[in-house]
Amino acid sequence: MERRRSVTLFLLCSFCLGMWLIGCSSNGDPAQPEGLGDPCDPDPCEGTLNAVPDTCISTSPTIFSCECLDGYIWDLGTASCPEDLCDPDPCAAIDDAVPGTCTMPTTTSFACACEDDTFWAWAGNTGTCEDSCDPDPCGGIDDAIAGTCEGFSANVFTCGCQTGYLWDSGTRACVEDLCDPDPCGPIENAVPGSCTMPTATSFACGCDALFFWDALTETCEDPCDPDPCALIAHAEAGTCDGLGVDDFTCGCDADFFWDALTETCEDPCDPDPCETIDYTVADTCTGLDVDDFTCHCESGYAWDEVTDTCAGPCDPDPCGDVPNATPDSCTDLGEGEFTCACDFGFIWEDETDACEVNACEPDPCEEIENTVPESCSPVEEDAFQCDCVSGLGWESVRLRCTSCENYRQCLQACSPFFNHVACVASCNDQYDSDCGCGFSLESPDYISCRSSCDISQEQWWECSLDCFFDACLAAEEP
């Protein structure tokens, strides 16, 4: 019964923790983050062996628990109800085990706390509390002292050893103490009293500065004597720096770098790697380390130290950040210029590097008489123009194809400073001056000329009539 209350408290605590982590809805049910489902819907307990249906409790969008039948306990790791090996309490019947301390480290095993000097050991389908020193193992070990056993866990112990021997935990034996007497004293450049035993059959000594222990020869060696740098191409003699018994570095000549793997001085720019990299300028390699370099890139490209390439405007892809552009559609045009494919209804604008509204999608020219099919071209922003059949010209104001007679414009400009009046008429880039100065085409036929504006020497007038709006604008002299 006590075990059942513990399980219930565990589930309640897990539930409360889940409420604190993810919050609750207004009715007290766990509030699931937007976009994630409820792990209790449908009810997973209904199909779980030995679980009680409709007892699911969710503690996160992916974690839930079920109440189990008597004799079973919920296991969160396997989301199952395995047999409760702690009910009834097995620890009460095990020698030196503490009653009521049963736990289940796995779904198929249990463990008990043990009395002093004993340790839990699991074997087969049960466990025992064992004393690693009973019976005393030290009495049967060569050169070990009987009665000196000290246990640390099941089957793990140490023994005191006779003089001249040391305990080796790896072999559970007393091995010869290779550091007694001290072997380091007579060794040249070794530090007396620094002996250690890295293994049961070897010793090591600390060495003087610039010297390193050689386990094979049991001596202290200087890797820079004789100087190895004097024999290495492009290495500077006298620059040797010892790192280990057989490990060293050398200073190198200008443009060369030390390669620790080959113990040589290497030039990362020989042969020139820039010659094989796109958009680089040949003979511009600059070495930074034995396997690191930079190259100068062509205009519009920049050196990428991570990939050792010249990255253009498409690396990384800019189109993913451009509204109404298709991601990964960047086209490198060279000189740092690029284009992106745009969604339907938009067109790429080089000046703004953006997808602007495309007035030609869908094609408006298909609905206009006397236009050439598929001849639409954007002009600015949402404006467009169409090509017209022979003999007609495009009228940008009324968006239609018309004759040059009806397409003419008269522009009248007057300036008191020059006492000059000019009138220019245009039709399909061909100039015509059917209207004299001070006159403009008159609606509705836009063929007849009429007087448009009065000109005054005391004022600065600008009169504009485009044949389509029949407007006259005047502004006083500033």
Image: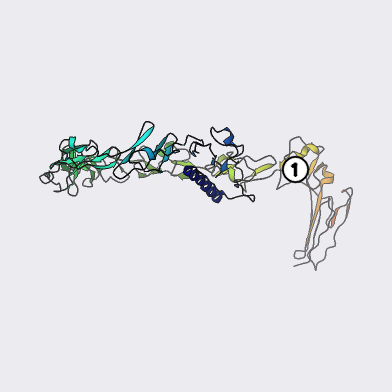
Q: Say which element carries label 1.
A: strand
Q: Magenta part of the protein: which range?
A: 455-478
Front residue of 177 and 92? 92
Left or right of residue 251: residue 47: right
Q: Nearer the viewer, residue 104 or 446?
A: 104
Viewer-nearest residue: 458 or 105: 105
Q: Is residue 358 left or right of residue 4?
A: right
The quadrant in which residue 95 appears is: top left
Tell me residue 108's x, y (percent).
43, 33
The furthest residue to the left: 186
Is residue 472 one of those drawn in magenta? yes
Residue 467, x across and y down, in percent: 84, 51
Label 1, residues with CA under 10 Å away: few <14, some 14-19, many ≥20:
many
**Residue nearest the viewer, comparing 135 with 203:** 135
Which colour scheme appears in the figure? rainbow
Reply yes or no: does residue 204 show up in magenta. no
Considering the image in quadrants, where does the C terminus appear? Answer: bottom right
Q: Label 1: which residue? A: 385
Question: What predominant SS class does the magenta segment belong to?
Answer: loop
Q: Amino acid at mark 1?
A: Gln
Query: Visible in this render: residue 279?
Result: yes
- Looking at the image, can residue 300 be seen? no
Residue 170 horizontal/vertical position (percent): 24, 37
Q: Is residue 412 found left or right of 106 in the rendered image? A: right
Residue 65 point in image, percent of width and height: 54, 40
What is the residue that sits farthest to the bottom in this orientation? 458
Lateral position of residue 252 relative to residue 49, left or right? left
Q: How many marks?
A: 1
